[in-house]
Amino acid sequence: YQLKISSGQLIAATPPSISNDTSWYDRGTTVVTTYNNIWYVSYNSRLNAVGYRLDGGKESPIPRADSGAFQVSLMMNAPHVIDVDAVPQYLLSLSFTDNSESHGILPTKLQLDIQGFGIRSIQDMKVWLDNGTSFSVVSVIWEGVDVKPQDLTRFTLNGPTSMVFRTRVFDAAIRATDGFGIPVSGASADIALANGTTISRITGSNGTITMSMIPLGTYEVTMTHLGASTQS
């Protein structure tokens, strides 16, 4: 009997009963076929196997995988046709900037809420998703603080996509003045940020300290000048 493979990427099969007699087997022969889980990878698109059908019957699902192979075993007691079912997948690439979109940031941890999978941690800021899958950004950890975008819009992936998100990382300024509102230059400031780190600065001639790339959160400032200290 003849075994036909109508779809999927076959990488190995039990040799035919007669050498070089492609796909024909003696009755009662057990045949094992091996297929790639992923194929047709090009332009950030690919197919991902989800199951197979024997002779056009009901789909037999297989575990989803991003690599490797799966096998189908059957006995040749009649002619058979194997169809591999697959879904198209597209690569989603994400990048992030500070709130002013002036500087890029590289999160230490990124989590998405993905339709059908729930909340997942994403490695290398890239993930393959099924066509039509919706998702939202739920956590962006940078410098120990969650600076995820304020707008948690859900998006739907319909093709290879690159997206840039503006996070809650800001520039900040501190101004020191005396009791008359006159700027105080040369004052020392110890600034404790929301992530627990402390930075030290000296006020300039206008009494101001500027800081860039500060993660969202409350920070405390201890200002010292001529032996006097104040905290805010």
Image (spheres, rainbow, N blue to C red):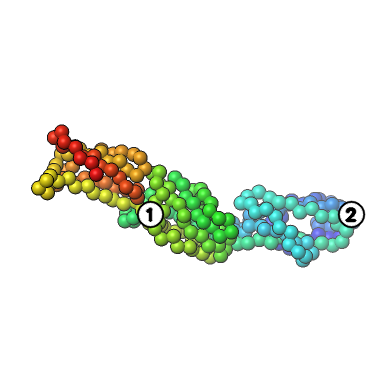
Horizontal and vertical percent position of residue 150: 39, 58
Q: Are marks 1 and 2 in contact (CB under 8 Å)?
A: no
Location of the C terminus by quadrant is top left
Along the line of sight, which residue is nearer the eye, 66 or 198?
A: 198
Q: Residue at x 63, y 62 (%)?
A: 87
Q: Quadrant of residue 196?
A: top left
Location of the N terminus by quadrant is bottom right
- The amino acid pointed to by label 2 is Gly
The residue pinned by badge 1 equals 167
Q: CA distance from mark 1 to mark 2?
A: 63 Å
Horizontal and vertical percent position of residue 48: 63, 57
Q: Quadrant of residue 50?
A: bottom right
Q: Which mark is residue 28?
A: 2
Residues packed near mark 2 inside 10 Å, few (<14), some (14 to 19) or many (20 plus): few
- The amino acid pointed to by label 1 is Thr
Instruction: Assign a secondary structure to mark 2.
Output: loop
Horizontal and vertical percent position of residue 27: 90, 56
Task: Work out whether 138 lies above or below 196.
Answer: below
Task: Work out whether 77 lies above or below 206.
Answer: below
